[in-house]
Amino acid sequence: MDGPPIAKRRRIVTTCSECHRRKQKCDRRKPCNICLARNLPDRCSYSDPTVGPRLNKSSNASLDENFSALTHVEDQENVSPPASRGFNIAEQIGYSPMKGSNVFMDLQHQLLKDDTTGNLSLPNVAQERVEPEQWEDQFWTLVAKLPSKSVSEDLIGIFMSEMNWHTGFFERYYIQQLYKTWQEIQTRTDAPKQPSLKDVSRDVLYFPALLFQICAVALHFMPPDSAMIKVLNVEEMIHRNRLSERYSDHGMKIMDILDRHRPTITSVQHDLMRALWLKDCGRGTESWHALSTSTRQAQELNMHRQARVDQSGTVAETLTRLWKDEYRRRLWVILFIWDSHMSMMLGRPRLINLDDCDIQVPIDCKFPDEPSTVVPTAIRNARDNEMPVPISGHLFRYSIAQLVHEMKTNGANRRHPKDYTSIQALHEKAVALMDGLPAYLRTQNPDKSWDLRLPWIPRQREQILDNATSFLLALHRPHIHSSPKSRKAAIQAAIVILESQERVFEITRQYQYRLFGLAFFTIDAGFFLCSTTIMYPSTDRDSSRRIDVCLQEGIKRLEILEHNNAIAGSGLRLLRHCYQLLQNASTTRDTYTEPASHVPETVQQPEGNDQGNEIPNAFDTFHSDGLHTYDVPDQIHFPSTSDLTGFANINEFDSSYWIEQMNQIPFVSMDDATVANPWDFPFI
C-alpha cells in the first residue's frame, strides 16, 4: 500500500511580491530598492508577514525579531525609507536644484520661511552624508585592494607629472587635501574594525574610487626607472596592463556601491578619469559613455552655470571660496573640451548645449599652493617671471571647442552650405586664435627658453597645433568637392597634422606611446590625405613628394607604436592599403615622383584673408580635370574586415571603425550630375 504523500518543500519568499514576480533581487525594505527605482513604491508589499520587510542590519535575525519589526511598521502606515534612499518630490520629478530654474524652486524660494515646506527642500549634494548600511563591508573590501600609502603617493605623483599637464583634470592642492583627509579617516581609530562612514562627506567617500582610476592611468605611463615597477612586480607590460585594468574596475565597483545619485566634484573626476583610461585602451564607445556620465553629474552640480560666490566671512575664507569656484570652472572647461572634441572627431552628438552655459572663463594664472592667501588674478607677480602654466593651452582648446559648437549650430560642417562665408568666418577665427597665443605656445618662431625647464611645453605646443588644424580639417572636409579653397585648406591641415605628429613622436619616450592621440591623429589625417590625393592629384612634384614623405613617416610611426598603442595596429594595415592605392594611382598616371630625401619645411597656416584671393600655391596645380582619368571608384575600394586576415580586432577602434571613418569622406563620381564642375565654386 502506498504511503502518505511526501510533502513538498515550500520555499520561503523573502522578496516583495513585485520583485518575486519579476525575479529581481530585493533588499526587503518597504518600499524596496527595486520598487523605488521603478517609481512604484505603492506596489511594494509582502505576502509572508514573517519575513519582510527588513528593518535591521543583521541577516541572522530570528523570525520573532522580524515579526516584531513588522508589527512596528504596520503601526505606522506611512513609513519613510532611510535617508540614503529617500526621494522627495523634486527628485521624483527631476527638477533642477538651480534657483529660479523651475516652478518648484520658485515655490521653495517664496515659502522658504514657512516651516511646512522644510520637507520639500532639496538636499545639499556637496555636504550630503551617506547612512552606512550593508554596503560598508563591500566598500572596505574594495578599499583594502588599494596599493600601500607609499605606492599610492608615488602613482599620484607619476600622474601629476606625466599626464595632468595634458588633461588638466586636477589641481595639486585639492588632490592633496582629499588624500590627506582620506588617510585621516583610515587611521582614525585603532580598533580592529574599520571606522564608521556615517559622518564622512560624499566628496571624500568617492575618493578611493578616484584613487583607483589615478593609479590605473599612472600604470600606463610609468617611467621605466620608477621604483614602483619592482614594488608592484609589474616588470612586464602585460602585467602592468592587467593590474591597471583591475584598479580601474575596482574604482567602478566602488562607484556602483555608493551610487551617483548625489554627485560631487570627486565623482565627476572619477568618471572623467575612467573615460581617459578607456580611451587609451582603445575602448572609444565606453569612453564616450563614461564622459556622458561625468558630464551629467557636473550638470547636476550646476557646474555649467556661474555661481555667486559668498564673500561674507574672513578674507581667508572668501579667497578659499573664490579659488574653489575657479577650480570648478576649470574642470567644466575640460569637460566642454572633451565633449566638443569627441563630437568633432568621432561624429558623436554633443552632450552640452552652449546656450545652457554661462560660466565665466577661468583665469589664466598659476593655481596657488595655498588658496587662502592669494587673490585670484591674471596679473603675474614679479617673482613668477611670467612662468608658463598649462591652463593657457587648455583655454585655447576651450576657444576652439566653442568654435566647434558654432560650426555645428550654423551647419558649416554639412555639405553644400547655403552661405560659404560662414566657413570663411570660422576659418579666420581659428587663425586669429592661433595668432593670439603666448610666445612660448605659438608654432611659428616660438619662444623656446622654457622648453628645457618645463618639458611639457613642446608637447603642449604641438597639442595646440593639432587641435586647431583638426578643427580646420573638420571644417573644410565636407566641402572638398565643391570648393577648391576648402580642398586646399583641408589638404594643408592634414599635412600640418602629420608633420606635427612626427615632431611629437621625436620628443615622446617609449613609455608614453600608449597616449591615444599619438596614433589617432596620424591615422585620421593619413586616411584623408590618401583618399583626397587619389581623387585630386597634384601635378607639382614638391607637393607630391611632401605628401609621400608625410604618409611614409606616419606608417613608420604606427609600426613602432603597434605593440604599445591600442589603436595603432587597427589603423596601420588600412593606412598601408590606402597608401598602396595612392602609389598605384601614381603609376597609372605615369607621373614620375622623385624619392624623398628629406622632410620639407612645415606648411604655414593659411591666413584668413587668403581665402578670397588667388595666391600661387603648390596645391593650386592639380590635375586639369580635377579627377583621375581612370576608374576612381574601383581604385578606392576599401576592404572588408574579413579581408584583413591576420589582424586581431582587440578594441573598438578596429578595422571596422576606420573603414567607417573612410566612408565619411564624400566621393564625387565623374557621372554625378549634381556637380557640374567640382572646381567651380564662387567664394563670396
Image (cartoon, rainbow, N blue to C red):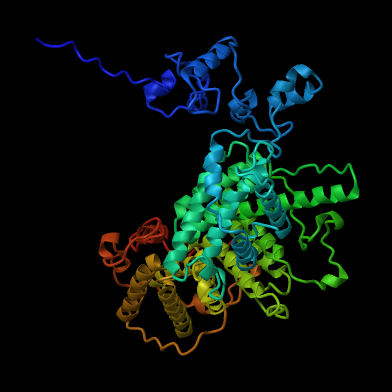
Residue sitting at x 86%, y 67%:
381
Q: Is residue 660 or residue 37 the one in the foreground?
A: 37
- In the displayed structure, would residue 213 be above or below residue 100? below
Residue 170 image point, x, y percent: 67, 57
Residue sitting at x 57%, y 49%:
209
Can residue 340 be seen by looking at this rendering? no
Residue sitting at x 76%, y 49%:
325
Q: Is residue 422 or residue 285 the one in the foreground?
A: 285
Residue 80 image point, x, y percent: 61, 20
Residue 639 image point, x, y percent: 29, 63
Q: Quadrant of residue 110?
A: top right
- In the picture as drawn, the residue positioned furthest to the right comes out as 314
Can residue 122 be seen by looking at this rendering? yes
Q: Is residue 605 or residue 399 the one in the foreground?
A: 399
Quadrant assignment for the N terminus: top left
Quadrant assignment for the C terminus: bottom right
Residue 328 image point, x, y percent: 71, 49
Q: Is residue 213 or residue 364 the one in the foreground?
A: 213
Q: Is residue 206 left or right of residue 589?
A: right
- In the picture as drawn, the residue positioned furthest to the left comes out as 1
Q: Quadrant of residue 311?
A: top right
